[in-house]
Image: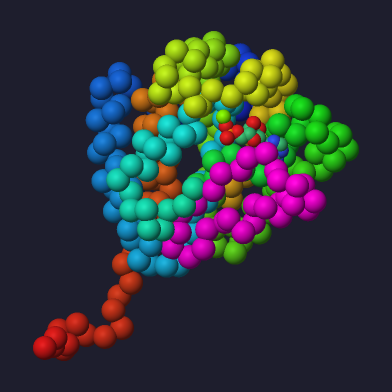
C-alpha cells in the first residue's frame, strides 16, 4: 500500500510537521479527485458485502482540530455508500449523566455490531485531548487513560472489530482561513463556534496531546493514520484509499445460500 500518511514518533513535533504534503500521491487535484471517484465504487461494493455478510465490524475514529475536516470527510468519502449499515456517532461535551460515569461509558454502546461500519466523529480520544489541554482532569487521571484506551481497543479487536483511526492534520494558518470562511460565508455561519477561538489559543498544547495520544495508542490492532489535511482533495483520497485497503483485507463475502435457489419456484 502507498504510504499516504505520516509516521510520527515520541519526539515528533506536530507543530512542525507539514500539513501541505501529499505522501503517496503523485499528481495534482484533478487526478486525486478522479482516483477518489474510482475507489468510491469499490468502497460501496465492499460495504454492501460487509453488510450482507453480517459477520465483521469496522470502527473508524476521526479526530482533528476544529475545522480540520471531520465533517467533510464523512460527507465526501461516504457519499453514495448505503446508509443501511453505516452510522455516525458524534461525541460532544459530555452531559451531566455522562460526566457522572467513567469516560468510556458513553462510548461503548456506539461501537459497531456485525455487518456495521461506525464512524466516530470525535471519540474516546477527547478524554486525553480536550480534557488534557483544558485541564478538566489532572495529569494523574488522564495519563492513566492511554492504557485504558489500548486495552479497550484491544478488547474490541480481539472480539472481532477492525479499527482504523485518522488524525486529520491541518496547521494553524489553515485553521485561521477556515474559521474566517465560517464568518464570511453566511451559509457557514452556523459552524462558527466562539469556543473554537479559545481552543485555538491552546494550539501547541493540542499538538503535544495529539502526538502523545497517537504514539501511545498506535497499535497493529488499532492503527493511527496521520493525514496531512490542508489539501482537502489529498485528505479525501488518502482516507478513501486507507478505508478501501482496510475493507479489502477484511474481504467480506456475500453469504452462500443454504438452499438451492434453482429448486425454488415462485408462483
Ligand atoms: P463539535 O465537534 O464542533 O460539535 O464540538 C464538540 C465539542 O465538544 C468540542 O469542543 C470538543 O472538544 C468537545 N468535547 C468532546 N468530547 C469531550 C469531552 N470528553 N470532554 C470535554 N469536551 C469534549
Ligand atoms: Mg465545532
Above or below, 172 relative to 154: above
Above or below, 179 relative to 224: above
Q: Can you name the residue that lies furthest to the left here?
A: 267
- The reply, left or right, for residue 51 in relation to residue 256 is right
Q: Is residue 103 magenta?
A: yes
Q: Position of residue 177 (x, y in %)?
A: 49, 12
Q: Position of residue 199 (x, y in %)?
A: 67, 22
What is the span of residues highlighted in magenta in the rendered image? 89-118
Q: Quadrant of the N terminus?
A: top left
- The reply, left or right, for residue 22 in relation to residue 180 is left
Residue 166: tell me if it is visible.
yes
Instruction: Name the residue nearer the viewer: 185 or 82.
Output: 185
Find residue 192 and report its image quarter.
Answer: top right
Instruction: Name the residue nearer the viewer: 255 or 76.
Output: 76
Above or below, 207 relative to 84: above
Residue 174: tell me if it is visible.
no
Q: Position of residue 202 (x, y in %)?
A: 71, 19
Instruction: Name the residue nearer the viewer: 202 or 198.
Output: 198
Q: How was the colour assigned to the protein in this rendering? A: rainbow
For the point 33% across and 72% down, the residue is 255
For the point 30% across and 20% down, the residue is 29
Predominant SS along the magenta part: loop
Q: Position of residue 119 (x, y in %)?
A: 50, 47
For the point 40% across and 51% down, the residue is 247
Q: Quadrant of the C terminus?
A: bottom left
Q: Is residue 236 magenta?
A: no
For the point 42% across and 17% down, the residue is 185
> Exactly how many numbered labels are in the figure?
0
Q: Ligand 2 is found in which quarter of the picture? A: top right
Amino acid at each position: 500500500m502507498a504510504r499516504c500518511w505520516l509516521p510520527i514518533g515520541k519526539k515528533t513535533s506536530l507543530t512542525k510537521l507539514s500539513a501541505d504534503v501529499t505522501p503517496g500521491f503523485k499528481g495534482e487535484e484533478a487526478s486525486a479527485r478522479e482516483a477518489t471517484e474510482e475507489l468510491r465504487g469499490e468502497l460501496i461494493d465492499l460495504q454492501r458485502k460487509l453488510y450482507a455478510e453480517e459477520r465483521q465490524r469496522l470502527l473508524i475514529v476521526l479526530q482533528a482540530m476544529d475545522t480540520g475536516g471531520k465533517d467533510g470527510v464523512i460527507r465526501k468519502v461516504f457519499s453514495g455508500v448505503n446508509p443501511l449499515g453505516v452510522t455516525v456517532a458524534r461525541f460532544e461535551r459530555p452531559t451531566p449523566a455522562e460526566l457522572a460515569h467513567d469516560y468510556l461509558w458513553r462510548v461503548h454502546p456506539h461501537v459497531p455490531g456485525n455487518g456495521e461500519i461506525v464512524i466516530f466523529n470525535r471519540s474516546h480520544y477527547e478524554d486525553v485531548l480536550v480534557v488534557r489541554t483544558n485541564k478538566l482532569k489532572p495529569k494523574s487521571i488522564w495519563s492513566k487513560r492511554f492504557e485504558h484506551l489500548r486495552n479497550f481497543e484491544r478488547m474490541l479487536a480481539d472480539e472481532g472489530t477492525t479499527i482504523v483511526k485518522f488524525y486529520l492534520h491541518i496547521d494553524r494558518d489553515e485553521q485561521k482561513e477556515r474559521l474566517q470562511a465560517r464568518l464570511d460565508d453566511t451559509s457557514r455561519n452556523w459552524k462558527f463556534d466562539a469556543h473554537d477561538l479559545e481552543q485555538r489559543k491552546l494550539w501547541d498544547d493540542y499538538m503535544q496531546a495529539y502526538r502523545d495520544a497517537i504514539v501511545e495508542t498506535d497499535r497493529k490492532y488499532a492503527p493511527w493514520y496521520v493525514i496531512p489535511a490542508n489539501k482537502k482533495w489529498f485528505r479525501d483520497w488518502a482516507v478513501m484509499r486507507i478505508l478501501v485497503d482496510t475493507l479489502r483485507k477484511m474481504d467480506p463475502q456475500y453469504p452462500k445460500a443454504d438452499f438451492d435457489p434453482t429448486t425454488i419456484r415462485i408462483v
